[in-house]
Image: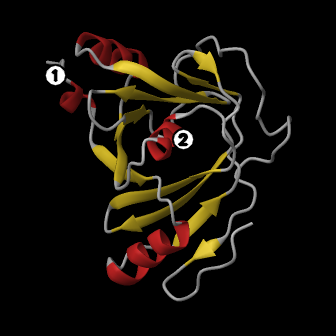
Amino acid sequence: MINPTIAGLGPIMQLAYVPRDLDAAIAFWTRTMGAGPFFRLAHIAYKAATYRGQPSDVDFSVLIGYWGDMQIELIEQHNDAPSIYSAWTDAGQEGLHHVCLVVDDIGNARAVCATAGATVAQEIFLDGYEAFYVDTGGAPLELRLPRSRPGPARKVPQGPDRSPNARRQPWAGIAFHQAGHAQPRP
């Protein structure tokens, strides 16, 4: 039987933060918590993004590391495009930004979230892959398929193309961050 609640959609695989001071966040996670190393995925290349149903040209990078089995994501937005990241920092918020669930069926995840009253706040579309973030009335929640399984074909919203063939290379600018060995950010 399928669990028709958001909690039943899949396991939490990630804790994500949008820190005001990225260097301090890296130091906290590597030195204090013993997580890492962290790898920078600079200027994420994507086909399209939406924020609150409208195209968004959000430019962001992420640092990914592990704290045991839990993925830790540190997000840095580089422009003032509307997004869940800029809305968070503009509201003066700090701390945990969102958790990410890995789901087996992205369409079912959308339906369950809608039934629960959660609204889609942001979507990111990559070649053969998508993730979406819902506003649950608290912190946003990201839902996505496992990286190795592309989702069903969906019409990608029109907007600025940030795919690898547009302006960026996928996962370009990978840098390594480890306790006491943080590399300068590009």
Task: Point out the frontmost of discs 2 and 1.
Answer: 2
Examine the rendered structure and indicate whether residue 177 appears above or below residue 98. below
Q: Residues within 10 Å of mark 2 (few under 14, many from 20)?
A: some
**Residue at image coords 27%, 42%:** 11
Q: Horizontally, is 131 left or right of 184 in the view?
A: left
* Amino acid beneath label 1: Asn
Residue 88 in view, yes or no: yes
* Amino acid beneath label 2: Ser
Q: Quadrant of residue 164?
A: top right
Q: Horizontally, is 40 left or right of 167 in the view?
A: left
Q: Position of residue 46 (x, y in %)?
A: 69, 35
Q: Quadrant of the C terminus?
A: bottom right
| Residue carrying label 2 | 86
Q: Horizontally, is 171 left or right of 93 in the view?
A: right
Direction bottom: furthest residue: 180
Q: Position of residue 47 (x, y in %)?
A: 71, 28
- Secondary structure beneath dot 2 equals helix
Examine the rendered structure and indicate whether residue 111 appears above or below residue 7. above
| Residue carrying label 1 | 3
Q: How is the image coloured?
A: secondary structure
Q: Position of residue 27 (x, y in %)?
A: 46, 78
Q: Quadrant of the N terminus?
A: top left
Q: Answer with mark 2 or mark 1, whichever residue precedes in sequence.
A: 1
